Every structure is written in C-alpha cells, then in structure tokens.
Amino acid sequence: MLIWSQLGDFDSLEYAWWLQREAELLIEEGLVIRAIGIGDRASGNQRVAFCGS
C-alpha cells in the first residue's frame, strides 16, 4: 500500500509510472498495488485535465 501526501505532485506521478511499467512482474509475485492520497474525485479530474493521465 502506498500512502501519498497528494496524488497530483510529480514525485507521486513518476512513482506511479514506474509501478505501472513493473505491474505485471509485481502481480506475478502476488503483490496488489493500492495507492491512497489526499484529494477527491474533482481534484483528481483536474489533475488528469492538466497532466493528461
């Protein structure tokens, strides 16, 4: 489980990209990835609009 201070900062974004690239390997090892951060759906949608993902 990942606990991030916020979901829109670039450190969290880069970490999420790394996890996505390695997700298949992590799942094969029996790991389940979950991330928790500050914000709500509206702030998440704003981040997606700004960053594109």
Image (cartoon, rainbow, N blue to C red):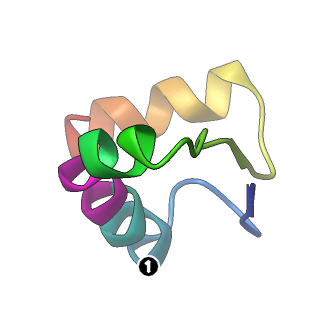
Q: In the figure, is residue 43 to the left or right of 40?
A: left
Q: Residue sitting at 57 percent across and 46 percent down?
A: 31
The residue sitting at 77% across, 42% down in the picture is 39
Q: Nearer the viewer, residue 33 or 42?
A: 33
Segment tinted magenta in the rendering: 17-22
Q: Residues within 10 Å of mark 1 (few under 14, many from 20)?
A: few
Number of labels in the image equals 1
* Residue at x 42% of width, y 38% of height: 27
Relative to 40, 45 lies left or right: left
In which image quadrant can residue 52 be found? top left
For the residue marked with disc 1, what is the amino acid? Asp
Residue labelled with disc 1: 11
Pick the residue in front: 8 or 16. 16
Q: Is residue 9 above or below residue 11?
A: above
Q: In the rendered view, would you say 9 is above or below 7?
A: below
Is 44 covered by the magenta stretch? no
